[in-house]
Amino acid sequence: MTSDGTGAAEAALPQEVAFAQEVPRGEPILQVRDLVKHFPLTQGIVIRKQIGAVKAVDGVSFDLMQGETLGIVGESGCGKSTLAKVLMNLEPATSGSVRFKGEEISGLSGGALKAVRRNIQMVFQDPYTSLNPRMTVGDIIGEPYEIHPEVAPKGERRKAVQDLLDVVGLNPEYINRYPHQFSGGQRQRIGIARGLALKPEVIICDEPVSALDVSVQAQVINLLEQLQKEFNLSYMFIAHDLSIVRHISDRVGVMYLGRMVEIGSDEEIYDHATHPYTQALLSAVPVPDPAAREAKDRIVLTGDVPSPAKPPSGCRFRTRCWLAQEKCSHDDPALAVRSWLEGKAAHESACHFAAEREADRT
Ligand SMILES: Nc1ncnc2c1ncn2[C@@H]1O[C@H](COP(=O)(O)OP(=O)(O)O)[C@@H](O)[C@H]1O
Ligand code: SF4
Ligand SMILES: [Mg+2]
């Protein structure tokens, strides 16, 4: 990772690699370096033997800046949820480093972990299954106070929960209702209220609108944007397609098979993508104007996503890449800025032949 312009990686990078000039606003609130999460594959019932590993997250580095929204995009199975869970310390990392405001948080346990958890909260994809159907909305939203009573002492909890309901646009009088009495969009508002209960600084939203009707998605996204301003939140916003994160993200990172393959400002990614995978994802984004749709040169990705237990050698995208060359099969491209790129194209991309696509430039 080179976005902070420091680190040992600098010396090891080839000459074709330069550094990004554009520094995102704010200070980094989360710094993720070489993060790895492998799930062991085992065989045998009596004597369990490890025969391999699912490389769900396999060397991911990026910064989340204070007050920004970083969109994380990639096809299903590329490791987005695993990345979120490792950042939340819900799953232990296999290796790598996660710093919150400069302090190492991966591998923490006990009281130290509890203190950090307060600051990093998550909003989950499915508002139908992530809320306990037997608990009232008041108990669901107020549950985090059981672990952190210092945020809202017992006598103040009801009021705190009612304030949260109000903040997310729900009637505070609904406090004694159950999740099934709400619509999908309202349930996601409950999930967001719960995420806000401990007054976190970072919220990781894992596909928060994917399970909702299109008509409701915009309302929930608007609410998240409004809350970000009100509470100075930093968001990591995970989605499986680029169109959803377009309006909410300041920067976007694209993942493929456990790796970050391209990262940059929204303009750099949407208008000046240099990685073939991002270009393929962009060409699949619906274009509203029929004339523009005609003119757009579509890329149809062929071949299945390889198994994360056996990723291809060299560049992981090479089995589906129309630009692949011999070098791609043995040389794993670093996520970095290539020296031949200029202007908005000069952002981090993990491709030996990173270049803007002609069709995107018109
Ligand atoms: N607990 C687990 N044990 C084994 N493999 C897992 C586990 N969780 C996720 N995986 C695998 O890791 C890969 C990434 O999954 P996930 O992070 O859920 O992807 P995404 O959120 O991008 O769809 C997938 O191949 C998935 O099957
Ligand atoms: S490094 Fe090679 S295979 Fe990988 S994206 Fe670039 S051109 Fe395609
Ligand atoms: Mg997921």
Image: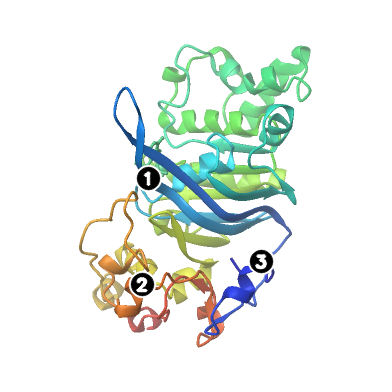
Q: Is residue 9 left or right of residue 351?
A: right
Instruction: Report crowding for label 1: few under 14, some 14 to 19, many 20 or more residues within 10 A (C-alpha).
Output: some
Name the mark nearer the viewer: 2 or 3: 2
In the image, residue 227 above or below residue 151: below
Identify the image quadrant of residue 129. Answer: top left
Q: CA distance from mark 1 to mark 2?
A: 21 Å
Q: Nearer the viewer, residue 272 or 340?
A: 340
| Spatial CA span between label 2 and label 3 | 33 Å
Dots 3, 1 in contact, CB < 8 A = no
User: Is 328 in front, or is 246?
Assistant: 328
Residue at image point 32% right, 22% down: 46
Residue that badge 1 annotates: 54
Q: Secondary structure at mark 1?
A: strand
Q: Which residue is mark 2?
A: 330
Q: Is residue 8 left or right of residue 256?
A: right
Residue reaching furthest to the front: 47
Circle nearer the N terminus (3, 1):
3
Amino acid found under the numbered disc labelled 1: Val
Q: Is residue 146 visible?
A: yes
The residue at label 1 has a CB less than 8 Å from ligand 1: yes
Quick check: is the Cβ at mark 3 less than 8 Å away from ligand 1?
A: no
Residue 121 point in image, percent of width and height: 61, 36
Q: Judge the density around disc 2: few (<14), some (14-19), many (≥20) Cα neighbours within 10 Å.
A: few
- In three-dimensional space, the C-alpha distance between marks 3 and 1, rounded to whole angstroms, equals 33 Å
Residue drawn at x 24%, y 65% as measured from the top left? 301
How many badges with numbers are in the image? 3
Among the two numbered marks 2 and 3 on one chain, the one whose residue lies closer to the N terminus: 3
> Counting residues from the N terminus, which is met first, the one under dot 1 or under dot 2?
1
Residue at numbered disc 3: 24
The answer to whether the residues at label 1 and label 2 have Cβ atoms under 8 Å apart is no
Q: Which callout, 1 or 2, points to the residue nearer the camera?
A: 2
